[in-house]
Image: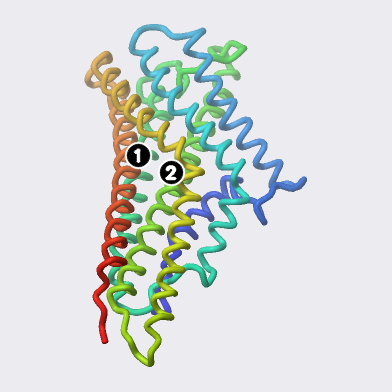
Amino acid sequence: MENFDWLSTIKINTKMLKYLSLWPTNGQYKLDLYKLYTTILVLIFIHTYNMSIFMGIIFSHKNLADLTRRIFMTSSEILTSVKTHHFIKNIKTLQLMTEDLESVKFVPPKNTEQIKLVQPDLNIWKLVFTILQLSCWTTVVFIISAPILQRKHELPTPAWFPFNTNISPNYELTYFYQSLGVTVVVAVVISLDVFVMNWMMIIGVQCEILCDNLKNIKNENNNFNKKLIDCIRHHKVIVSLAENCNNRYEMLFLCQLPNSSLTLALTMFQATLVEPASSDVITALAYGAAAVIQIFMYCWFGNRVEFKVSDTRTNFYFPKLKS
């Protein structure tokens, strides 16, 4: 019991966000080096990088395969910019929600049986997190190395810049900038998606604990009413958490699913337009695999929450009372 930390996943996630300048102290950005770091990372390596890819659709696409690649990359990058802006805008509330997890309002696993109940969810989270990282970083490696492997004088990602990128040292500097840009963007995408996944997992874990407490209510020392009231309060806390998450991520959920579906469709279409043995096919397939995992992640954990909420209702109406 002492070694079990049911909040280990959220701690890993917040540490990642802090490294990416998205987790300031006390939920606010002050005039310090951390804010400067955030400004550089978000403005130069996320928004400017994404804008250069978007402008490439208008000014510099070569053929249908190239245009297709630019479109699916642009749709993903725009959503990343929106996610980042939305996260920074709500950072104070999100940090307060995270701090509340360690308060008395939330109930940690109290015994070995409850640990066994919540452990599968933590294991699934770690598995999905590992697969998501593997697919995303594989995509990054292929994107950055593709021009080198093909011996082409091209940039890692199709983009437009207001200067000639074909001459030295412009080409080398732009190549380095895009390599950093795609690395930062992917790290942010992983961190923000996993953050949402964390909250869905935590809601599910709290429902599991609440259900177990309801099933094992005992009328010992005439304290049945107190235990039932504690369960009702716990249920209200879970409902409040679910509503907060829904209010802050409802529109992002709505945008994420069609965006991932569009990305998957366009990557598969692009794979039919290029040489079967080229690195472009591998990059497209890796990009498509990452989109599939994103869809799976949201749907799987969302479905788990729905199932556990339904199970909680059943236990509220039909608790197995023990005397």
Q: Which residue is mark 2?
A: 193
Three-letter amino acid code of the residue under disc 2: Asp
Q: Which residue is mark 1?
A: 294
Q: Secondary structure at mark 2?
A: helix
Give the class, few, some or many, for how many residues have Cα within 10 Å of label 2's Cα (few <14, many ≥20). Answer: some
Give the class, few, some or many, for how many residues have Cα within 10 Å of label 1's Cα (few <14, many ≥20). Answer: many
Q: Residue at x 60, y 47 (%)?
A: 91
Q: Residue at x 43, y 74 (%)?
A: 229
Mark closer to the chain start, 2 or 1: 2
Residue 188: x percent and y percent? Answer: 50, 41
Q: Quadrant of residue 253?
A: top left
Residue 67: x percent and y percent? Answer: 39, 12
Q: In this rendering, is residue 103 above or below 140?
A: below
Three-letter amino acid code of the residue under disc 1: Gln
Q: Secondary structure at mark 1?
A: helix
Depth check, front residue: 281 or 169: 281
Depth check, front residue: 174 or 70: 70
Residue 215: x percent and y percent? Answer: 28, 74
